[in-house]
Amino acid sequence: MCIFAAMIRNLIFDMGGVIFSLGYEQAIRRFEEIGVADARHLLDPCVQTGLFGDLEGGRISCGTFREELSRLTGRELTSEQCAYAWKGYILDVPQRNLDKLMELRRRGYRTVLLSNTNPFITEWAHSPEFSRTETCPEGGRPMDDFFDRLYFSCDLRMMKPSEEIFSHVLEAEGFRPEETLFIDDGERNVAAAARLGIRTFCPHDNSDWTVPIESFLTA
């Protein structure tokens, strides 16, 4: 008897390292610029903890984060400085990724984003700055235009790799796990999704996933 795997109908994408190229070292330098001397010990490439995790987990506001970071650095920081430092994580948004997302939606895949992130980054994601380039400064479109829905940890008040956040997205979207592919460069995140029966693809951070993903869609 032949047993066929269920067809992939739904795609859940991570953001940093997948949709945009992740600049951990750039973020470290920017936080150091604004006075966070031990930024390398406080920040993580994947999952934030402490004050930074509280912001990404939706447990504190941007205002509280700014106040606490000001206290930590011993200098009064502005919201603009905090945004500047956080956006150091963003190197660029490769055009190939945007083209592939639009292609996948045209082919009928339900495409959503699930990211551990904070309001400084989500403000950028919801703005035309998300896809604005030097060659097309006026043609930017927000991330909302490339996905059917966006799920951010700071809004949900839960974070990957908690299985709770994956269960929430599956229920909210009406996704069957076996028909869903999760694309994330974090091994802990894909392991958590796999425990729920979600099919997974773990590309190396900042690598080109636009061709390899086809092997999961045609299998």
Image (cartoon, rainbow, N blue to C red):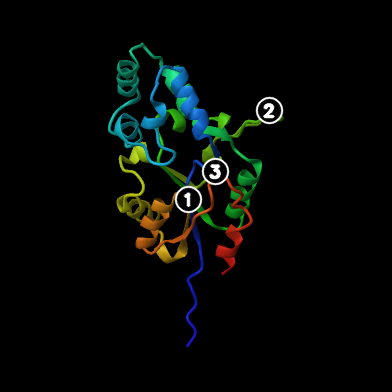
Quarter containing the C terminus: bottom right
Residue type at mark 1 is: Asp
Seen from this angle, which residue lies furthest bottom? 1
Look at the picture and state if 52 lies above or below 147: above
Q: Quadrant of residue 214?
A: bottom right
Q: Locate residue 113 relative to residue 158 in the image: left or right.
A: right
Q: Position of residue 152 (x, y in %)?
A: 40, 40
Disc number placed over residue 134 in the picture, else none: 2
Q: Which residue is mark 3?
A: 19
Residue 217, numbered label: none
- Name the residue that disc number 1 marks: 184
Dot 3 or dot 1, earlier in sequence:
3
SS state under label 1: loop
37 to 99, vertically: above or below = above
For the point 40% across and 21% down, the residue is 37
Among numbered discs 2 and 1, the one appearing first in the sequence = 2
Which amino acid, by three-letter code, is at mark 3? Ile
| Residue type (three-letter) at the residue carrying disc 2 | Glu
Q: CA distance from mark 2 to mark 3?
A: 18 Å
